Image (cartoon, rainbow, N blue to C red):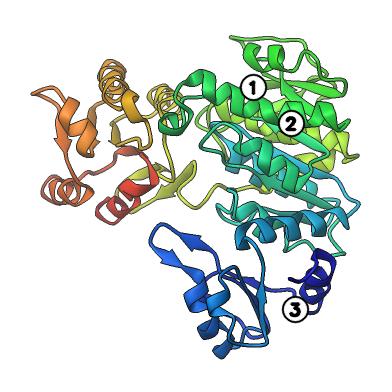
């Protein structure tokens, strides 16, 4: 069994990791991970034949090539390798956890910090027990800061991810009703997110805390090293170490820092995104960026990938937020959209996944909320929404059915908001708008 240092030495000579034989690159190291419906060990020889330098396996019956490295558990060894590799990097590592806004905060922070540093941040959605190790293993000696997004779906997972990534700085975006099927309740969500604060406390790390979020303030009470930030507007004015003052929060956020009259114009909308912006601002200031560099980073960030993305078509304007959804994020984004200064506002809402026993009640509640906000039209899409819809609601069980409806009833000069869980693929509706 190869020792960890030896495996790391091999990795430095072959710094590409692959877990999918469909994506084998010449010279990579193939890790034979297992899943409910596949056994990576059975693909190890194929990976080697297609150009992998080594294959890490954990079943002796597949040890039929000198380039196969037998370990006790492939996933555990991948995580250990990532942890060891991260330990060689004496740089700030920033962990981002929370229910909503993790990816937006990560991308904002990346845009800000790249104004001064060579930054590596989580690519795409590689934020789970496999994705975090893969992200860390892409760290290079030239990187000066790492930003690691962590996406947990059960209690204890954030603690495990922290042990792998070993963050020196961290932020919880918020506590919301995400992955309730795995967490069991909002209390489970809070317990999971608190695991980051626990790690920072035990390892002398520094946390950034939204002073406008009372739950986070309470959770951070015992932290020795922390910076508070607040995105304030007319409705809320909280004292914090770093304060941003909103001049407007929709349709786009314009603000200035309380400490100086520097106007910043973001391409994001809504007070919930102002929180994400101020998180990036506070970490940027902590790491020595000038206010001018922070302004450039915020203003250069343009949302994409179906997250808070604005798409203008020949006929309509789309507010595309169809990458993911849970009751907390959907309610905040829906209320923000309803308050937008646009005529002819149409909302298309897709099912929210992984809610377990809360699914029926939360979809019912969202229908009630959407119907109360004074929108011109609301269209519900998905099995849960269709089951809970009222007789006079417009509801479809599938995105294809909704697509057919809009082809028969085209929209013109409308502002359309699309929000749903990734599996609903609401972005497919964009073609008809």
Residue at x 79% of width, y 19% of height: 258
Residue at x 29% of width, y 22% of height: 370
- Work out how far the residue at label 1 is from the one at label 2, CA to CA, in angstroms: 9 Å
Against 216, residue 409 (above or below) is: below
- Work out how far the residue at label 3 is from the one at label 2, CA to CA, in angstroms: 47 Å
Where is residue 30, by image quadrant? bottom right
* Residue carrying label 3: 14
Label 1 sits on a secondary structure element that is: strand
* Residue carrying label 2: 263
Where is residue 282, by image quadrant? top right
- Residue 19 got which mark? none
Residue at x 53% of width, y 27% of height: 270
Where is residue 161, by image quadrant? top right
Q: Residues within 10 Å of mark 2 (few under 14, many from 20)?
A: some
From the viewer's perspective, is 152 left or right of 220? left
Q: Earlier in the sequence, mark 1 or mark 2?
A: 1
Furthest residue to the front?
A: 61
- Quarter of the image for the N terminus: give it: bottom right
* Residue carrying label 1: 247
Circles 1 and 2: CB distance less than 8 Å? yes
Image coordinates of residue 304 in percent, x first then y, are: 52, 51
Q: Residues within 10 Å of mark 3 (few under 14, many from 20)?
A: some
């Amino acid at each position: 069994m190869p020792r960890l240092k030896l495996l790391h030495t091999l990795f430095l000579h072959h710094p590409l990791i692959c877990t999918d034989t469909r994506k084998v690159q010449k010279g990579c190291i193939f890790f034979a991970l297992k899943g409910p419906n596949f056994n990576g060990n059975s693909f190890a020889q194929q990976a080697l034949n297609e150009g992998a330098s080594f294959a890490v396996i954990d079943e002796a019956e597949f040890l039929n090539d000198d380039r196969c490295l037998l370990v006790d558990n492939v996933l555990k060894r991948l995580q250990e390798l990532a942890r060891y590799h991260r330990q060689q990097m004496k740089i700030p590592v920033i962990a981002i956890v929370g229910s909503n806004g993790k990816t937006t905060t990560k991308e904002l922070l990346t845009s800000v910090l790249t104004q001064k540093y060579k930054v590596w941040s989580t690519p795409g959605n590689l934020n789970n027990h496999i994705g975090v190790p893969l992200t860390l293993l892409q760290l290079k000696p030239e990187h000066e800061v790492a930003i690691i997004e962590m996406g947990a779906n059960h209690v204890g997972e954030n603690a495990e991810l922290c042990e792998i990534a070993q963050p020196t700085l961290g932020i919880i975006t918020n506590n919301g009703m995400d992955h309730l099927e795995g967490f069991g309740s909002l209390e489970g969500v809070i317990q999971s997110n608190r695991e980051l604060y626990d790690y920072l406390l035990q390892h002398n790390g520094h946390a950034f805390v939204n002073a406008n979020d009372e739950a986070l303030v309470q959770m951070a009470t015992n932290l020795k090293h922390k910076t508070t930030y607040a995105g304030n507007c007319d409705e809320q004015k909280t004292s914090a170490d770093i304060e941003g003052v909103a001049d407007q929060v929709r349709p786009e956020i314009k603000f200035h820092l309380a400490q100086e009259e520097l106007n910043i114009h973001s391409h994001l909308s809504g007070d919930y995104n102002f929180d994400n912006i101020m998180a990036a601002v506070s970490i940027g200031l902590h790491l020595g960026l000038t206010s001018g560099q922070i302004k450039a980073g915020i203003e250069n960030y343009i949302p994409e990938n179906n997250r808070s993305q604005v798409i203008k078509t020949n006929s309509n304007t789309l507010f595309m937020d169809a990458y993911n959804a849970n009751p907390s994020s959907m309610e905040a984004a829906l209320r923000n959209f309803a308050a937008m200064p646009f005529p002819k506002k149409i909302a298309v809402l897709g099912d929210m996944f992984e809610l377990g026993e809360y699914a029926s009640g939360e979809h019912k509640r969202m229908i009630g909320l959407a119907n109360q906000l004074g929108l011109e039209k609301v269209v519900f899409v998905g099995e849960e929404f269709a089951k809970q819809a009222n007789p006079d609601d417009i509801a479809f069980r599938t995105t294809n059915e909704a697509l057919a409806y809009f082809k028969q009833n085209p929209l013109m000069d409308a502002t359309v908001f699309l929000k749903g869980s990734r599996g609903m693929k609401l972005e497919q509706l964009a073609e008809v708008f």
